[in-house]
């Protein structure tokens, strides 16, 4: 293993756009719209919350772009939090990300993929879990081989995924029952819960922040991340609006709220029940795409942790193939462990999402605050990109993430304590580090 290797600028803006689109558009767009439809009173408000979700994501992306271009590093958010609040705060983020956020996301995507693959090729009683294990191992091995193989796989899967979403959009509009635009304005419910609606909308938009982990690997180091984030999120927002308008046009707001598989229902209304196999393939490719991007991004924060803490130094080795191989192996094993626990408990992963959300939004809130903290602390640092309308946009992002944190706490209830317990377990390695190792020096500014 070549321990002297380090991240190289090998990714084009197109590669990064594909990674962003692939990470964001997962299984969520096939499931979340029915939940959101049940929380808003009219079609226009249903579409509006999705548009607001896109705008909020772009605002957050602009904040991240300033941090990523000012301090490009494979550690992404870990690196920003370390500079703004110290290594201990960054450590707990890396711990939460490695033990719950990334591995939980990988398991959710893999098991969803397994559910649909089982409708195509049934491997027996544990078919969905076996497919989940196969997908995690195969994609981890592809990324282990090298960054080039990982990005080529991502680009191909993104093209297939976008084509699949467009096929669903076409299906929705071809069977549209909406007679006029006035149907969008009709109130079909007197109750609403916009906070919960936005939790699921922003969950479906989640993943754009992962671009920060490749800030040290993009060829255009001054504007590459900014352009990729804006183009990537713009494309995702457009696809989401088209897909949700197609859903609404076919099923109506109440029909969506009552459907457990809104995209599948729309697709089969257009093409017949014999098209179920094609729809399953669309979801499989979508899950594969998001899973591959999550694997590629996820290992970067563990790598940064290994750079700063001697107890985790074995994770901080960058291989000449263009990947932190040890981090990839650990990430794969943890994700497989989560799948194994799912087999034992026979429970879905709603609980994983629930206890992950409060922890996730806590740290994303801190990243928003870091924009202001680092502006004040290091005014002399060259910033190739600055957030427009500073400090207004960072404050908007901070307020929205604070609202998301509160909303997710209200939604998750006791599940939040499980996430906090896992986070607290991170104290043990930190105590070991303090007693048995001297912390490495702060990075040069």
Image (tube, rainbow, N blue to C red):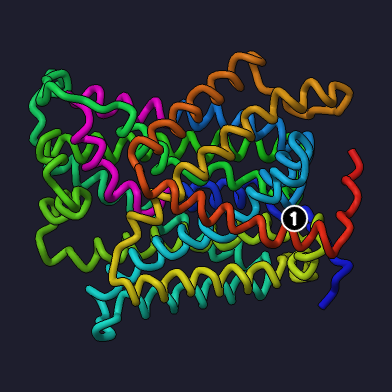
Q: Residue at x 22, y 73 (%)?
A: 119
Verify whether residue 34 appears in magenta: yes
Vertical arrangement, residue 8 with respect to residue 389, above or below: below
Residue 209: x %, y % from top left: 57, 42
Question: Which quadrant of the structure image shows residue 329?
Answer: bottom right
In this orientation, which residue lies closer to the viewer: 217 or 199? 199
Q: Secondary structure at mark 1?
A: helix
Quadrant of image for the C terminus:
top right
Q: Residue at x 34, y 49 (%)?
A: 28
How many labels, in total?
1
Label 1 neighbour load within 10 Å: few <14, some 14-19, many 20+: many
Question: Which quadrant of the structure image shows residue 227?
Answer: top right
Q: Residue at x 60, y 40 (%)?
A: 228
Residue 55: x %, y % from top left: 46, 26
Verify whether residue 49 appears in magenta: yes
Q: Residue at x 40, y 67 (%)?
A: 110
Q: Which residue is mark 1?
A: 304
Q: Which residues are magenta?
A: 25-53
In this orientation, which residue lies closer to the viewer: 364 or 425? 425
Vertical arrangement, residue 393 with respect to residue 145, above or below: above
Residue 46: x %, y % from top left: 25, 28
Quadrant of image for the N terminus:
bottom right
Residue 249: x %, y % from top left: 15, 35
| Magenta: main secondary structure | helix
- Residue 157 in view (yes/no): no
Q: Is residue 104 left or right of residue 32?
A: right
């Amino acid at each position: 293993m070549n321990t002297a290797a380090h991240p190289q600028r090998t990714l084009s803006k197109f590669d990064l756009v594909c990674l962003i689109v692939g990470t964001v558009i997962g299984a969520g767009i096939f499931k979340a719209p029915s939940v959101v439809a049940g929380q808003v009173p009219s079609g226009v408000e249903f579409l509006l919350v999705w548009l607001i979700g896109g705008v909020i994501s772009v605002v957050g992306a602009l904040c991240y772009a300033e941090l990523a271009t000012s301090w490009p590093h494979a550690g992404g958010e870990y690196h920003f939090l370390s500079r703004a609040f110290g290594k201990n705060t960054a450590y707990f983020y890396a711990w939460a990300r490695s033990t719950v956020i990334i591995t939980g996301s990988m398991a959710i995507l893999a098991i969803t993929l397994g559910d649909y693959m089982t409708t195509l090729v049934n491997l027996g009683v544990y078919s969905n879990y076996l497919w989940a294990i196969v997908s995690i191992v195969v994609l981890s091995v592809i990324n282990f081989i090298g960054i080039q193989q990982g990005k080529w796989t991502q680009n191909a899967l993104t093209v297939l995924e976008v084509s699949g979403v467009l096929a669903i959009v076409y299906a929705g509009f071809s069977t549209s029952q909406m007679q006029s635009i006035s149907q969008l304005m009709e109130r079909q419910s007197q109750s609403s819960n916009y906070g919960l609606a936005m939790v699921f909308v922003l969950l479906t938009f989640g993943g754009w922040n992962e671009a920060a982990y490749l800030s040290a690997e993009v060829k255009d180091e001054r504007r590459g991340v900014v352009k990729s984030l804006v183009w990537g999120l713009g494309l995702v927002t457009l696809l989401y609006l088209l897909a949700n308008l197609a859903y609404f046009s076919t099923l109506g707001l109440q029909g969506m709220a009552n459907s457990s598989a809104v995209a599948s229902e729309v697709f089969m209304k257009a093409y017949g029940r014999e098209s179920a196999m094609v729809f399953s393939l669309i979801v499989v490719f979508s899950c594969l795409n998001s899973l591959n991007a999550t694997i590629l991004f996820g290992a970067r924060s563990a790598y940064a942790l290994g750079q700063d803490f001697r107890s985790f130094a074995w994770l901080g080795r960058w291989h000449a193939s263009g990947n932190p191989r040890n981090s990839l192996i650990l990430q794969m094993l943890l994700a497989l462990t989560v799948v194994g626990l799912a087999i034992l408990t026979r429970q879905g992963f709603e609980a994983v999402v629930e206890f992950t959300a409060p922890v996730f939004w806590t740290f994303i809130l801190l990243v928003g605050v870091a924009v202001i903290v680092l502006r004040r602390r290091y005014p002399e640092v060259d910033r190739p990109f600055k957030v427009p309308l500073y400090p207004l946009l960072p404050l908007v992002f901070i307020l929205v993430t604070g609202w998301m944190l509160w909303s997710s706490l209200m939604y998750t209830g006791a599940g939040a304590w499980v996430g906090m317990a896992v986070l607290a377990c991170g104290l043990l390695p930190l105590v070991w580090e303090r007693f048995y190792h001297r912390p490495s020096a702060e990075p040069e500014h």
